[in-house]
Image (cartoon, grey):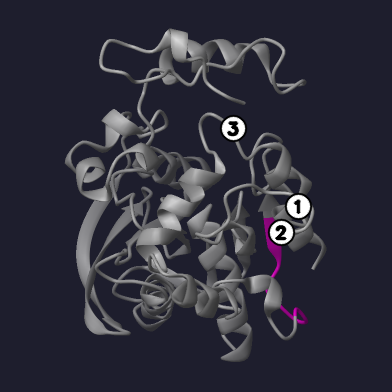
Amino acid sequence: MAADPASATPNGFIPHTIPEDAYPGLDPEWRELWNTHGSHIMRSDEVTLEEYRKDPAKYSFSYATYNGPEVHKVEDISIPVSSPPGQIQIRIYSPEGPGPFPVHLNFHGGGWVVGSLESERAWCRHMCNAVGIKVIDVGYRKGPEYPFPTAIYDCWDAAKWVRKTPKRRTSIPQSVSFGGLSAGGHMSAVLAHFARDEGIPIKLHLLIVPATDMRYCRRRVTRLDEKNCPYASARDLQDLPWSPLGREQWFLKYWLGDDDAAQDRAFASWLMTPMLAASFADLPPAHVVTAEFDLERDEGRRTRRS
C-alpha cells in the first residue's frame, strides 16, 4: 500500500494512514486508532538504531508507557551468562505469599535489537498477579553489539539459572515455563529443543506471533512473491503500515549483519530458522498465538502444526 505524497508533513514525512478499502477484515476500531495515533509516528526502520535508542517511544506506536499494576515484590539482579561470558540483568516479579511458586521466564520482543526490561513490564506484572506465579523478565544482550546467536544463549542460561536456585528464589524447579513475543517467541521455540536435548523438563513454551522462518526477509529481497516467500501472510501484508517487510529487514540488519553471506549463513542454521530443526519429537507442550494482520502469521501457524 503506497503512501500518498500529498499528505506529507512540512518536514517531508508521509503519514502511514490506512484507507478504508485497504486490508478487508481489519477491525474498524483498530483502523481508526492507528490513523489517529499511529500513522504520524516515524517507524523504527525509517531511522538508524542509534536514533531510535535515544527515544524509543518516538518511533514505536506500541512502545509501553503503562507500568502495569502493583505487585508484591520486584527485584533486579545480575546473573552470569556464558556465550560469550558476561552478566545480564533479570527482573523478578513475585506474588504475595510464602511460595514456592511456579516460574515463567519472559523473553521480550524487539527484533533482537530493541526492547528491554521496561518494554513488557505491564504484561509481566499482570501475569504475576493474575496467575499467582513468579515472572522473570530476561534482559538478554542485543545486536549489533551482541549479534546472533548471543541472545538465545543468554535466555537459555537464565532458564538454567532458575532451576539451580529454587530455594533462594522460592521457586518450583519442576514447574518452569518460558516464552515471548516475536523475537522472544523465536527464542522460546529454540529453547524448547535445548530443554528436550538436555533432559530439562519444561511445563510450557509460549510463542506469541513467533518469528520462526524469516528466510524471506533476506536483505537482498526487495519484493515478496511466490518464488521467494512461501507464506501468503508475508506476501499480502508486506506493506503493512505498522510492521512492513522493511521493518523486519531493519531488525535483521543489526542482529545478523548487513551482509548477504552472513545472513545466508545465519538463516541456514536452525537456531535462526527453527523450522529447519532435525526433529520436533518430544518437545515440551507449546501454546502458539498468531495475529491475523501480521507478516509472521502463517509461519506461526506452520509452527503450530510442526
Q: Residues within 10 Å of mark 3 (few under 14, many from 20)?
A: many
Report how far apart the C-alphas of labels 1 and 2 lie in the structure: 9 Å
- Residue hosting label 1: 231
The picture places residue 140, in percent across and down from the top left corner, at 32, 65
For marks 2 and 3 on the same chain, the one whose residue lies earlier in the sequence:
2
- Looking at the rendering, the stretch of residues picked out in magenta corresponds to 280-287
- The residue that disc 2 covers is 228
Q: Nearer the viewer, residue 246 or 59?
A: 246
Q: Is residue 97 magenta?
A: no
Image quarter of residue 89: bottom left
Of residue 238 and residue 201, the one placed in the foreground of this image is: 238
Query: In which quadrant of the rendered view does residue 277 lie?
Result: bottom right
Q: Secondary structure at mark 2?
A: loop
- State the separation of the CA atoms marked 3 and 1: 15 Å
Q: Position of residue 60 (x, y in %)?
A: 37, 33
Q: Nearer the viewer, mark 1 or mark 2?
A: 2
The answer to whether 151 is drawn above or below residue 296 in the figure is below
Question: Which residue is at 52% across, 38% downward?
Answer: 243
Residue position marked by numbered label 3 in the rendering:
240
